[in-house]
Image (cartoon, helix red, strand yellow):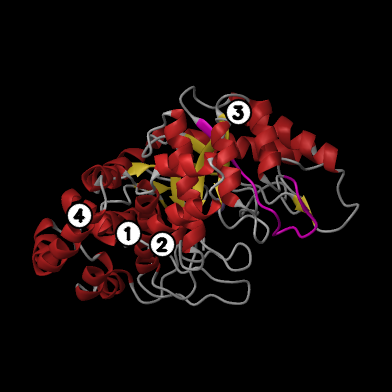
Amino acid sequence: MPVNAKLIEDHNEQHIKAHRRKFDFITAEIANAEAIVQKLVEFNIAIPSWALGTGGTRFGRFSGGGEPRNLEEKIEDVGLLHALNRSSGAISLHIPWDIPENYGAIKALAAQYQLQFDAVNSNTFQDQPGQALSYKFGSLHHVDAKVRQQAVRHNIEVIRHGVELGSKALTVWLADGSSFPGQLNFRKAFQRTLESLQEIYRALPADWKLLIEYKAFEPSFYSTTIGDWGQSFTLANKLGPQAYTLVDLGHHLANANIEQIVALLLMEGKLGGFHFNDSKYADDDLTAGSIKPYQLFLIFNELVEGMDARGLDHATGLGWMIDASHNLKDPLEDLLQSVEAIMIAYAQALTVDRQGLVLAQEQNDVVKCQEILQQAFRTDVRPLVAEARLVAGAALDPIGLYRKSQLRKLLIDRRGAKTIATGL
Ligand SMILES: [Mn+2]
């Protein structure tokens, strides 16, 4: 492991004076700094196994070098991130891209880096080598029962892999949809999807969640069979108490009010998890907070308010995961940026004057409501996030340390300059 306690200590030593100055300033500015730092220490965001290699577009892919060649190296990369920020303590696997050959060895490796296994993800959006039937026209909604059966069996197999590793959730995202009017009978497609999901649901262990992700469009361009939160929510309600909706920030039509969606799903007890990314147009897979940090804050504002209203533990009540794939940045630096942006938005949401906001809302004081939210958003909470890292034994400046230690060069030396992460 290239990042050890000594390296972190030496790095923090160099930054501690400047950090103390900034932290003292903010603790004087806000009331509950210590409690916020403690919440930040507990908060972790899972890293998906497919975010560790350079993503591409349909036009090209430009590999960055030193990418993880197998599951072991993916776990090593997440371990590296977690050692730097102590906020990335889980990995989310994609089956069949990351099928473990030896569960015991994989679990031991993850434990060595203090990593948990987050939700497992099934894949019926592409055909695998040797697969009997094609998903060209969909999977769980397919007109042919044999294709649906194959897709159901795959999902149940994914659950089995997850059970072996200690995961507690299956995330289903379907590419099922249609690209031309008339191609699909919407009612039948939805009904077939429900029946397939019911079969998968019956195979869930009692302490597992089924997370149903939705997406407005792409790869289909006319309709998606689970296209929005209402469709996912309907399925989750019909399936039962272990089924939940999963919100991916990039899966909405432009200008959708995601914070309102989140608030209502939480109120109904059906928000199960989150996929963080950012976008200018649609599913752009950009770094969280890179385009719309205010939206990210407003979402966290609703999350904190809604989770507190239901008495949910912020760290464990919902599944938190990044879902992005980058084609320009070093994936590890990009993930450090995403985690930082998420922590900042969460910290800002924790500083919102809740009582003041309730009062202003009840008095229809629209100006005051905006003042309260923007006061929190415009407060520089980065010293709180840095303090949480310091307390947890992470680096005060994770990207600075990553660069100074030349960790990418080290990975390239070990793995080679031309490697491609499995699944990409
Ligand atoms: Mn997603």
Spatial separation of the CA atoms under disc 1 and disc 3: 32 Å
In magenta stretch: residue 102: no
Residue bearing the label numbered 2: 52
- Residue at left offset 32%, top offset 69%: 415
Q: Are marks 3 and 4 in contact (CB under 8 Å)?
A: no
Secondary element under disc 1, as helix, strand or loop, is helix
Label located before the other in sequence (3 or 4) = 4
* Above or below 2: residue 45: above
Spatial separation of the CA atoms under disc 1 and disc 2: 7 Å
- Residue at left offset 63%, top offset 63%: 282
Nearest the viewer among 368 and 262 is 368
Residues in magenta? 209-225
Residue bearing the label numbered 1: 77
| Amino acid at circle 1 | Asp
Residue 2, how many percent across, how many down? 19, 63
Q: Give the quarter of the image for residue 342.
A: bottom left
Residue bearing the label numbered 4: 28
- Residue at left offset 44%, top offset 46%: 320
Q: Which mark is residue 201?
A: 3
